[in-house]
Structure formats: structure tokens, C-alpha cells
Image (tube, coloured by chain):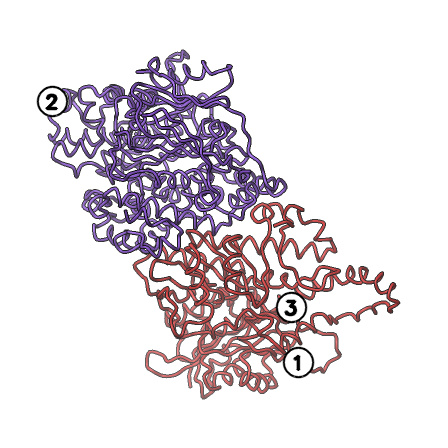
Chain colours: A red, B purple
């Protein structure tokens, strides 16, 4: 079958362009890496596969960068399409798979590197954050390939992996994923990147504090005549593995709640077109959540309350170009409301807040697992050590995963922002979305400074202002 | 021993009998109503007969202080006064900065209750040794600064003292007369001066050195550090207010089509003309120095002077944004010299510049349309833009001479007397201040639901968020969001008024730092949620009083028809607020407050709020 055309349909091109640009902003691609594909019915009603051309710049796609292929036969278009076209075609033949995407998810690749000799069989990646754990699964497969780019071996293994998993890792290269829509595939890849980032942050945090913990325990051990702690082999982090195994065994004890499944059916819904200013606010805040990496693509939620209704963005992190659904829902709880929506409603019912944002700030998620040297339990509050943060917030509470709703609401009343370990960041605004947005944004900076202090071997508790410790 | 931050004492003075009693402030009142506005409203509600004549002996004046006043908390120097307003017939309430609030707190009392009526002019003399009601015949007819000078220069033992006085406008029962201290710090809206005047009360002098206790000094200092830091961080509290004062809002308001023009006929006065009355123009041509209330770090007040060839002709304080907007563009007047002169004189004679400006603007429109007869105008040829008349009109009004007699009644009574009440730009007979409600639906709702009438401060200062809200900037034209926004802004205002702090701090931070400060001072947990709860309680009590005083929300609680019928252009679209939308926003607001559809707090709600319902039922 001949290549059909090189001038893309406007809508399909906009979709590819927006996702491509967003993937570059998410830093899951380099200038030319990765590829996207989806099944699509063209104007003639014929089903085709749309796929990005090889060597195209995914962040700045042109209409000529989209190839339209037959799903059943090879044509010349294949040679201009992605080098991984064969893999995509097979993935798109899986039941329910309408879209597939490959990206250089660096954070996840870095988190899965090992120094074992090739050929190797890497262990699966076990995420420690609720988004990846629940959306991508408690074990994400990792495969090593002798030829890790467009090889027949990959075309065989990867579709098989994606029968049972939404996403799979290509060792040292990236990840491939399938979804019902292109947005869902991008969602999966962003979660994967976020999961790798969080694991790496936690690991760095543990390694940086280990020396101090060791030193602190030594006198006790001497007193009790215990042997000194053996030095750890490079590359191993038993504390992280311990956390992973406990999470796998009892996720409900480590995560606040299971996020609702990704819903592709409400993609472009907007229930309140007449409220132009509020729509603009949602899009502005959503874009900031996305671009500033305060929450992975289409994760988190935000709302503005009215008297009887709330305006609700269930996929809060949204690039301008891609957007997300904006719903008008009754304030009263309804059957079928998911946990996250119910929490918005509950908070509004018991407070005067007008806006709420729930975001999965990766730095906060990781930092909430910090255990100070000499202590057994993770931190219960984040005390800013930077100038701006320490005056904006004397402290920010870190609540346990199984926090009671009332305690979360009280914390929000007192601090306007609270971290739930294994549950993201909740922030409230008295008036505007922008006000609520400021909190996760500040919190990210606060955590970055604290994480940097830990990594440099500084003693955080010496840096924390005394006055803040009282709050 | 009193709760830290309080003295635990309330002074009760009956001017008719001369009885003076000192009572105890109950811990319950403190914990449920906090201080300032909350406490004053509670004391007022318990004592005031809603149907009483505002200018009769049964009107009760409550002045209350707050737990933060007397501490080093930034801007915590404000006092709050509650009374029944002679202008509106409903709750009157306003606050006052300057130095008086702190001096009053140092007298050793948390609140003063004044009722009855003296037979001749008197002033209340409050000193550590004794409390007296003293003759004030020598102060009769004196303007504000003369009265203050006379009282403070003759204090017992020559100790430093502060005075709160009325001017001729108050003595002449001008319905929007003010009470003033420090020459130009005013309890300015709703006619408190007329209530003082009706009681033959010329003023109150206070001196004392009582201090408050601080419960947890380390926490107190930490929370003060935070609040002060945040004030220094905000460009508004750090620079704009100090450099341009509130008049710095003039050009900002014009750019948003929010600045009133010709009695709110439109909101587009000529930009070049507006520049001539802007805060920038004041700073360039009249500002002597930025001034402040007691130890306030913001320093938004203006010490100004009118000079000719470097010779100072007159000097004084201001003008503020409201004065410029209402005596200026609302009257189509752009002669800053005239506005400042009139502003000085209004301050000296004790007139609320907002209501005065609004009433004059109304009179100008009535006159231009031929509804104001020459007899009513006293042969003054009133029309928009006649700046040379401003100062004269201030004087006529304060002394109720000629056309001033009608102007002294406020815009609604003036327009009604001319047969066109719809031309009065007011809500509950209180003149709309200098923010066009069509340019901010939330502000419009704030005017409609304010307990004191069209007051941006009591109604929720939504316009300020449009001008300088930063991350609190709200949609200006959202029917959906405005009811909750206004409830929350009103609550913030109630909390600020009850803590005795300045609203300007709201540009830098919200309630949380105040929660920490008041908790550390008192030793009680006044969390942000608890402060909100107090605010909801106070709002309900204020509403109850107005309903008992006969308020019909649909008759008197809506904006004039002009705002529904004549759109202004804003953000490229015509903007008006239909009566239907006004009613819908009000109904949504009532429900947001937990009240019923008619705006009445129900029994179960009152019970949950711990508001004593028996008064409500009586």
C-alpha cells in the first residue's frame, strides 16, 4: 500500500505536536528521540497507523513529520517512519491498544542501571510512589537487549510485556508504553519518569545520611558489644529495598489512597464554558503544575468551589496545548465519586477554602521518607532551611499515609499546605487557584534545598531555625 | 487574672444618668468574639434595641479594643466602633487607626459602652485615677484639630494622652459625620459623629500606661518575625503604600475601568485628567512626607501641603484614594488643589469624604437633569466638574446651611427629596465608595451584603484583589465564584477588625500569621479555622441585628438600577449586573454563609455558632 499523504490532518497533527512538545518539556526525550504512534480512522473511514517519522524533532513536529501507514501491510512509508515502527505496529495490535509511545525516560533508565555483566536479566523496577505503583503496577519489567533499538528481539519481547503491563523498560535506553489514547501513553511515561526520579532521590537521601547513622549507632553498638556495621557494597541500598518490599506487601499502609484509573473518555470535556476567567485560571495553574514538574502529566487534581457546585480538574497537571477535562460537579458527595474527589468535597464541607490543589510533587514525596540519623521514623514536618521558605512557612506538616481526613483538614487550616507521605501534597487557597498553586511550588523549592543539604552531608537539624521547631 | 492580651474590664457609661460602671469581660465573650469588631458587635447586640432611634438616647455606642493592641504586632493599633447608623438605620461599624486605639487599650479597658444622652456638651475623661464625664461647652463648635489640641493640652498631670472628638458636622447631626483622633484618623463611615453629637458627647480623652501580658514570648517573637518579614517582602506594603499611599490605586483603578465617573454613569474618565489627581501627582506636587499610624511599618498616610512659591498655605493629611475618587472623578473634578482643600476641610469639620463625595456627585447629576430646584441647591449652580464649589459645599454641609442641609442627609434622602431615589448610588443608604461594582462582581456582591451598607471594607475588599491581588487575584466577572470569595473576604475583614490590625497587611499575608500571633499572646489556640468560625459568628450576629432593625434585603440590599441598565466596558466586553444576577449572587452568598434563602441565619445554625438565639427571637 502506498504512503497516503504527508500533509497531516489538522486535529491529529495538533495532538501529536502537543504531546511531542510536552514530552520535550518533561525531559523524557532528547531533541530527536522517541516516537509516537496511534490507530486512527482517516477522512475516508479507513484505519491507518499514524506514527512520527524517524529523525523528526518530537518537540517541534511539522506536518510532514507524521507518517500514515497501513496497519496490515508494509509500504514505503515504513522507511520514513520511526525505526521502531515494527514494535509500534505490534503493540497497536494488542487488544485495547490504540496508541503507543517510546521515550528516553532518563530518570527511570538511571534508576534501573546496574553493573552486572551483559547479557543480563535485570530485576523489575519497583516504584515507591503511589502513582506509578497503582497505575503502572508494583513491578515494572526491565529487559536487556543485545540490540536495544528497533531490533526484531525488541519487536518480539516488548509487545509481549505490554500484554500484561502498561509500560516496560528497555534497559539503558528508555521505555515503551501502550494506551487507549496518545495522552494516556504520555501519562504512563511521565509516571515512569517520576517514579525513577523519586527512587533516585530517596536512594541519594539514604546514602547521604547513612554515614551519619552509622557513626551515631557506633557508640551504642560498642556499649552493647555489638559488631560494627559492615560497609555496604556499592550499588546496594538495603533500606530502599526494605521499603520496597514492605510497600509491595502492604501498599495500603504506605499510600494514602489508590488514585482513580486514568480516564480517557472525558478528554476534552468542559462543563462551564461561560466562566472564561475561571477556565483561564485552571489552565494557567495546570500548565504551571506541568511545566514546573510539580505533578506529572494529568495527575493531581484541583478545584474551585461555588455554593452548590465545584469546578473540578481531575487531571490537574496539564500543558496549555494539551489541556484536560474541566468538570462541574455537585458539592454534595455522590455515588461513584472517587476518593480524591470525595476528599475535595469533604475539605470544602469542613472549611472555608475556595480552592484546592492536590499535586504529586516528587521532591516532597521523596523527602517525606527522610529518617534523621539516630531516629527510627520518617520526618513529621518539613522545616525550610532557606530564607524565603522559612518565612513563608515556619513548618510544613508531613502526615502519615493513613492520615484521618479531619487531621488533613486541620493541617490545611493551620498551614494551608500539607504533605501526605505516599499521598502527594495538598494545598488550599482562601480565594484563588493561584494562591493554592504557590504552596506546592514553594514546597518544591524548600525540599530541593533540604535534599541538597542532605546530599552534601550537612546536618539539617542544625540548619533548621529553632523557632520553627516549636510549631 | 485576665486572659493575656486583655485587661478583662469593660467600662459602661450612661450619659443620661452620669452612672459609670466597670464590669468584667467574660472569657466566653473573648473566646467566641475575640475583640474589636467581634467583641463590640456582641456587646452591642446584647444591649441595643434594634428599633431605637439612631439619634436618640437609646442608641448604644461600643468601642472595643483587641488582644493584639498593645503588643508589637505590626499595625495592631486599631479600635472598632459599633452603633446604630443614622444614615442607614442599620448597624454602623467602622475602625480607626492613628494613635487612639493603643492609648485606649493602655487605659486598662477592653471596651467602652456609651448610652444615654447628656444634657449639655460633655467629654469622657478616662485616666488611671478616675473616670469622669466632664463639661465640654468650651469645645462646642470647635473643629477637630482645635478640639483635640484643647483636650490633650489640658490633660491631668500633663501626661501624654489621646483624644477622640467630633467636629461641627457631628454636632450638627450630619448623617455621615465622623469621629476623629490625631486630627485626621477617622471612624469614618455611617455617621458615628452624628451619634456622638446626638448624645452631646464631644469626645473621649484617654491616658494610661497599662500593659498587656504575653503568654508565650518565644512563639510570639517568632511569629512577629514572620509577619514583619512578609510585610517587607510585599512590594505593596513595603513600597507602594509608603511612596504613593492609597491614592496610588487611582490610576490602577482607571486602567481596570473601576474608577467612578460622573456619579457612576460610566467608569472611563479621561486618563490624562485622572493622572492629575493620581497618587503620583500627589507625591510629586503635595507630599511632604509619608506618615504612619503608631509604629506602623507600612506608612501609607500622607502629610501634604498646598504651597505657593514655597510658602505653605495649608497643610494636612491625605487625600486618600476614596477622597480622590469620590470628590474627584465621581464629580468629574480633576483639580487636585481643590480636592485637597476640600479634603482638609472635611477632615477638620468631621465629614466622611466618601459619603460627602457620593452625595455631591448625586446632587450634580440631579441638578444637571433639572431635578434639583434652585431652592434646594441654595442658588449654587451645581454641575459636574465645578471644582470651585467643593470646599464651599463641605462647609455648607457640615453646618447644615443652605443646600448643605439636604446634602447633610446623604444621597438617598437627597435624591428621594427630588423624586429620583434611583440616582443615589448607595446600598442601604450608604454611598458606594470609589470602585465601580460593574468592574468586579465580587465587589458588587460585597456592597450588597455588607452589614453596614455599601462599604468596601465591611463588605469585603474584592476590588483590591483586582488592583493588587498578586496570587490572590480573583476572576472579576464570575457569578460562580463571587459568593464564596466575598464570604471569605468579609471573614478576613472581620478577623482583621477583631484583631485590631490594618487591612493593608492583607496584601502581604492572610490569617495564618495572625493566628500564630494571637495564640502566642493569649495562650489560647486561635487557629485559622477558629478565627474563621469567629468571623462567621460575628457576621451572623451583624445580620441578625439588621434583620431585627427591619432590613428588607430585596428592597434595600441591591445595587441601584443604574448598574443593571448601563453597562461599562471592561476587558473588551460590556459589563452590567442584572437584577436577576444580583439576587442570585445574594442568595448564593446567604447559603454560602449557612443562612436561609432570605438571608436569615436559622435557629440550628445559630445554635451551632453558639449565638444566643433568644435575642433574635425577641
* Residue at mark 1: A144
In the rendered image, the vertical position of residue B312 relative to residue A126, given as above or below: above
Residue B393 is tagged as none
Measured Cα–Cα span from mark 2 to mark 3: 85 Å
User: For numbered disc 2, what is the local secondary structure?
Assistant: helix
The chain ID associated with circle 3 is A
User: For numbered disc 1, what is the local secondary structure?
Assistant: loop
Q: Are marks 2 and 3 in contact (CB under 8 Å)?
A: no
At x 60%, y 52%, the residue is: A395
Q: Do circles 2 and 3 both sit on a common chain?
A: no
Toward which corner of the image does residue A418 lie, by quadrant? bottom right
* Residue at mark 2: B375
Place of residue B111 in the rendered image (x, y in percent of width and height, measured from the top left): 43, 33
**Disc 1 or disc 3, which is closer to the eye?**
3
Q: Is A11 or B449 nearer to us in this picture?
A: B449
State whether residue B285 appears in this view: no
The chain ID associated with circle 1 is A
Amino acid at each position: 500500500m502506498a504512503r497516503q499523504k504527508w500533509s497531516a490532518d489538522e486535529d491529529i497533527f495538533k495532538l501529536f505536536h502537543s504531546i511531542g512538545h510536552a514530552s520535550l518539556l518533561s525531559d523524557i526525550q532528547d531533541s530527536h528521540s522517541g516516537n509516537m504512534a496511534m490507530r486512527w480512522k482517516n477522512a475516508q473511514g479507513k484505519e491507518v497507523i499514524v506514527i512520527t517519522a524517524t529523525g523528526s524533532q518530537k518537540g517541534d513536529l511539522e506536518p510532514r513529520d507524521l507518517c500514515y501507514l497501513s496497519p496490515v501491510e508494509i509500504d514505503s512509508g515504513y522507511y520514513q517512519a520511526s525505526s521502531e515502527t515494527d514494535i509500534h505496529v505490534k503493540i497497536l495490535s494488542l487488544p485495547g491498544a490504540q496508541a503507543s509511545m517510546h521515550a528516553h525516560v532518563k530518570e527511570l533508565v538511571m534508576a534501573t542501571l546496574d553493573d552486572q555483566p551483559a547479557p543480563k536479566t535485570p530485576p523489575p523496577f519497583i516504584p515507591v510512589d503511589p502513582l506509578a505503583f497503582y497505575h503502572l503496577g508494583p513491578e515494572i519489567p526491565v529487559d536487556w537487549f543485545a540490540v536495544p533499538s528497533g531490533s526484531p528481539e525488541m519487536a518480539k519481547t516488548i509487545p509481549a510485556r505490554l500484554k500484561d503491563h502498561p509500560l516496560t523498560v528497555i534497559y539503558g535506553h528508555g521505555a515503551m508504553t501502550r494506551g487507549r489514547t496518545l495522552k494516556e501513553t504520555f501519562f504512563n511515561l511521565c509516571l515512569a519518569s517520576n517514579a525513577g526520579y523519586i527512587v533516585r532521590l530517596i536512594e541519594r537521601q539514604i546514602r547521604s545520611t547513612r554515614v551519619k547513622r552509622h557513626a551515631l549507632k557506633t557508640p551504642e553498638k560498642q556499649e552493647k558489644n555489638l559488631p560494627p556495621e559492615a560497609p555496604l557494597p556499592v550499588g546496594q541500598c538495603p533500606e530502599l529495598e526494605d521499603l520496597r518490599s514492605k510497600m509491595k506487601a502492604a501498599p495500603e499502609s504506605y499510600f494514602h489512597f489508590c488514585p482513580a484509573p486514568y480516564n480517557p473518555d472525558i478528554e476534552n470535556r468542559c462543563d462551564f464554558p461561560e466562566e472564561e476567567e475561571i477556565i483561564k485560571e485552571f489552565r494557567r495553574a495546570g500548565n504551571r503544575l506541568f511545566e514546573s514538574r510539580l505533578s506529572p502529566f494529568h495527575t493531581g487534581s484541583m478545584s474551585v468551589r461555588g455554593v452548590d457546585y465545584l469546578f473540578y480538574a481531575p487531571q490537574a497537571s496539564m500543558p496549555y496545548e494539551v489541556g484536560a477535562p474541566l468538570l462541574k460537579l455537585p458539592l454534595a458527595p455522590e455515588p461513584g465519586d472517587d476518593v480524591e474527589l470525595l476528599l475535595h468535597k469533604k475539605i470544602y464541607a469542613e472549611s472555608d477554602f475556595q480552592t484546592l490543589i492536590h499535586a504529586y510533587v516528587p521532591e516532597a514525596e521523596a523527602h517525606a521518607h527522610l529518617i534523621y540519623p539516630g531516629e527510627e521514623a520518617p520526618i513529621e514536618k518539613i522545616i525550610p532551611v532557606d530564607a524565603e521558605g522559612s518565612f513563608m512557612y515556619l513548618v510544613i506538616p508531613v502526615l502519615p499515609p493513613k492520615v484521618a481526613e479531619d487531621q488533613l483538614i486541620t493541617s490545611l487550616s493551620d498551614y494551608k499546605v500539607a504533605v501526605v507521605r505516599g499521598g502527594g501534597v495538598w494545598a488550599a487557597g482562601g480565594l484563588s487557584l493561584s494562591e493554592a498553586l504557590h504552596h506546592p511550588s514553594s514546597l518544591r523549592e524548600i525540599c530541593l534545598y533540604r535534599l541538597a543539604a542532605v546530599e552534601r552531608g550537612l546536618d539539617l537539624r542544625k540548619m533548621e531555625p529553632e523557632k520553627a521547631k516549636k510549631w | 487574672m485576665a486572659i493575656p492580651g486583655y485587661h478583662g474590664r469593660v467600662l459602661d457609661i450612661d450619659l443620661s444618668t452620669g452612672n459609670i460602671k466597670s464590669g468584667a469581660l467574660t472569657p466566653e465573650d473573648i473566646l467566641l468574639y475575640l475583640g474589636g469588631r467581634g467583641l463590640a458587635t456582641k456587646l452591642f447586640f446584647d444591649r441595643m434595641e434594634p428599633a431605637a432611634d439612631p439619634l436618640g438616647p437609646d442608641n448604644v455606642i461600643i468601642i472595643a479594643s483587641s488582644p493584639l493592641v498593645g503588643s508589637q504586632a505590626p499595625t495592631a493599633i486599631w479600635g472598632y466602633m459599633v452603633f446604630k447608623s443614622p444614615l442607614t438605620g442599620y448597624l454602623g461599624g467602622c475602625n480607626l487607626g492613628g494613635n487612639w486605639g493603643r492609648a485606649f487599650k493602655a487605659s486598662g479597658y477592653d471596651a467602652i459602652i456609651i448610652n444615654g444622652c447628656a444634657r449639655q456638651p460633655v467629654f469622657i475623661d478616662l485616666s488611671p485615677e478616675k473616670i469622669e464625664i466632664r463639661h465640654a461647652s468650651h469645645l462646642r463648635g470647635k473643629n477637630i484639630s482645635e478640639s483635640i489640641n484643647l483636650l490633650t493640652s489640658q490633660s491631668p498631670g500633663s501626661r501624654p494622652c489621646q483624644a477622640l472628638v467630633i467636629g461641627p458636622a457631628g454636632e450638627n447631626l450630619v448623617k455621615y459625620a465622623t469621629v476623629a483622633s490625631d486630627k485626621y484618623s477617622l471612624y469614618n463611615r455611617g455617621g458615628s459623629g452624628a451619634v456622638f453629637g446626638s448624645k452631646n458627647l464631644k469626645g473621649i480623652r484617654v491616658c494610661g500606661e497599662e500593659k498587656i501580658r504575653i503568654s508565650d514570648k518565644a512563639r510570639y517573637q517568632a511569629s512577629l518575625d514572620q509577619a514583619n518579614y512578609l510585610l517587607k517582602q510585599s512590594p505593596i506594603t513595603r513600597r507602594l503604600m509608603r511612596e504613593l499611599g492609597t491614592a496610588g490605586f487611582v490610576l490602577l483603578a482607571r486602567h481596570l475601568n473601576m474608577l467612578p465617573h460622573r456619579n457612576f454613569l460610566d467608569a472611563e474618565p479621561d486618563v490624562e485628567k485622572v493622572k492629575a489627581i493620581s497618587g503620583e501627582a500627589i507625591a510629586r506636587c503635595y507630599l511632604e512626607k509619608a506618615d504612619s499610624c503608631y509604629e506602623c511599618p507600612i506608612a501609607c498616610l500622607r502629610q501634604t501641603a498646598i504651597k505657593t512659591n514655597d510658602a505653605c498655605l495649608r497643610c494636612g493629611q491625605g487625600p486618600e484614594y476614596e477622597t480622590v475618587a469620590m470628590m474627584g472623578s465621581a464629580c468629574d473634578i480633576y483639580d487636585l488643589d481643590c480636592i485637597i482643600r476640600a479634603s482638609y476641610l472635611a477632615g477638620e469639620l468631621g465629614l466622611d469624604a466618601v459619603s460627602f463625595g457620593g452625595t455631591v456627585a448625586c446632587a450634580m447629576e440631579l441638578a444637571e437633569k433639572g431635578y434639583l430646584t434652585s431652592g434646594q441647591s441654595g442658588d449654587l449652580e451645581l454641575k459636574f466638574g465645578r471644582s470651585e464649589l467643593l470646599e464651599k459645599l463641605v462647609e455648607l454641609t457640615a453646618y447644615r446651611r443652605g443646600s448643605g442641609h439636604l446634602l447633610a442627609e446623604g444621597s438617598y434622602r437627597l435624591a428621594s427629596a427630588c423624586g429620583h431615589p434611583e440616582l443615589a448610588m448607595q446600598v442601604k443608604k450608604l454611598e458606594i465608595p470609589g470602585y465601580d461594582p460593574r468592574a468586579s462582581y465580587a465587589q458588587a456582591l460585597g456592597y450588597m451584603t455588607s452589614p453596614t451598607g455599601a462599604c468596601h471594607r465591611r463588605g469585603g475588599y474584592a476590588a483590591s484583589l483586582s488592583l493588587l491581588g498578586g496570587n490572590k487575584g480573583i476572576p472579576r466577572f464570575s457569578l460562580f465564584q463571587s459568593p464564596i470569595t466575598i464570604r471569605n473576604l468579609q471573614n478576613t475583614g472581620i478577623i482583621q477588625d477583631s484583631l485590631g490590625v490594618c487591612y493593608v497587611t492583607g496584601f502581604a499575608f492572610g490569617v495564618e500569621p495572625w493566628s500564630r500571633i494571637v495564640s502566642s499572646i493569649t495562650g489560647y489556640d486561635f487557629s485559622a479555622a477558629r478565627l474563621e468560625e469567629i468571623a462567621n459568628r460575628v457576621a451572623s450576629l451583624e445580620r441578625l441585628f439588621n434583620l431585627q432593625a427591619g432590613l428588607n434585603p430585596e428592597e434595600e440590599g441591591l445595587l441601584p438600577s443604574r448598574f443593571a441598565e448601563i453597562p461599562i466596558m471592561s476587558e473588551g466586553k460590556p459589563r452590567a449586573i442584572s437584577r436577576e444576577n444580583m439576587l442570585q449572587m445574594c442568595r448564593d452568598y446567604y447559603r454560602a454563609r449557612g443562612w436561609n434563602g432570605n438571608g436569615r441565619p436559622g435557629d440550628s445554625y445559630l445554635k451551632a455558632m453558639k449565638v444566643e438565639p433568644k435575642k433574635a427571637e425577641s
